[in-house]
Amino acid sequence: MVIISEQGKFLLKRRPKGKDDLYRVNFAHSVQNHLADKKFPVTDLIATRDQKDTVLQLNHHIYELFQFVTGYRYDGSAEATVDTGRQLARFHEYLADFASQANLPKGSFHDSNIVRRHLRTTGTQKGARPGKKLQQTAEALMVLYNASSVRVSELGFDSWPQQVVHGDWHPGNMLFNGGKLTAVLDFDSVKVAPRVTDLANGMLQFSIVGDRPNPADWPDYLDQAKLVQFLDGYLQVVDLQRDRLDSLFDLMVETMIAEAILPIAATGFFGHFSGLEFLRMIERKAKWIDNSRDKLAQAIAHQ
């Protein structure tokens, strides 16, 4: 709900009952406040008048109040794409030594047994239609997922430093103005993981091509220019070691499969899209990344 008062314009958010853990919400708020202190573009959290707490619990709901930020959706321009990569690198730099509480939420889409379990069970439910085709597509994705997981693990993923990452760096969670990122809006997925997982996910989210109503009509390819622009912005701020660079395309395959299979295994759909059509599209795009890795590596090397 948007609230306009004598004190200004605000956005009130009420979380569904029982959906979010108070600990995770407080953790997300501590990350946002830390970034705000660094002048990173986040929306200001408004504290309660009595307890000075940015989280309000009332009737089993969690409420948050944010300063309203005016901005525009991602326009696909090279300037905006480069800046989102640049700001992700700043996000990582500002949070490199961040520590607020013990038992910080951890995990990633890499080498996940949860992803594999959902891939194995998708399409096997009795009465599921078209179950057989869905199962066959999930099996093909399992092969792609496992191959990418092995390559990333062999590069040393488990030994790479972990820190707070955003977990959901995509255009829908951002506002822009004049080709610059002016606000990151959603911190519900913050966790601890190697920062390269954020980078790979961002490269995927800003380069994926899917502007038609039916996923069956989405092209196989990604937008190579945007992929390179995003990475270029990131590398303007931080240097990336060779093994991390070499992991990016396989991590993109892993995150694409993981993000698709979890909701489809639960509901049979991805949003309003048919689970079968969506997974077939994911399979085509994952194969395109796999087959295009040499061409993409050359494009990145020229930056």
Image (cartoon, grey):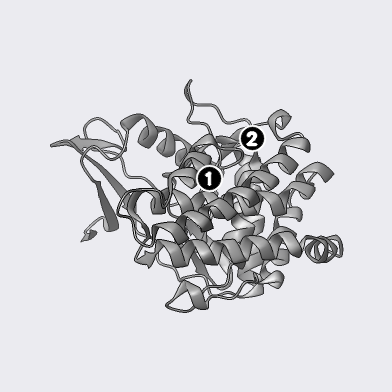
Q: Nearer the viewer, residue 51 or 241?
A: 241
Q: Amino acid at mark 2?
A: Ala
- Which dot marks residue 166? 1
Is residue 41 in view? no
Mark 2 surroundings within 10 Å by alpha-carbon count, few (fewer than 14), some (14 through 19), many (20 or more)? some
Q: Are dots 2 and 1 in contact, CB under 8 Å?
A: no
The amino acid sitting under disc 1 is: His
| SS of the residue under disc 1 | loop
Extreme residue in the top direction: 102
Taking the spot 31% from the left edge, 32% from the top edge, the residue there is 22
Left or right position of 301 against 166: right
- Identified at 84% across, 45% down, the residue is 242
Query: Where is 129 relative to 97, above or below?
Result: below
Q: Residues within 10 Å of mark 1 (few under 14, many from 20)?
A: many
Residue 140 in the image: state x and y as whole percent. Answer: 59, 55
Which disc is residue 45 wearing? none
Residue in the foreground of this view, choosing between 70 and 298: 298
Q: Does residue 129 appear left or right of residue 71 in this picture?
A: left
Asked whether 181 or 223 is in front, the reply is 223
Q: Which mark is residue 96?
A: 2
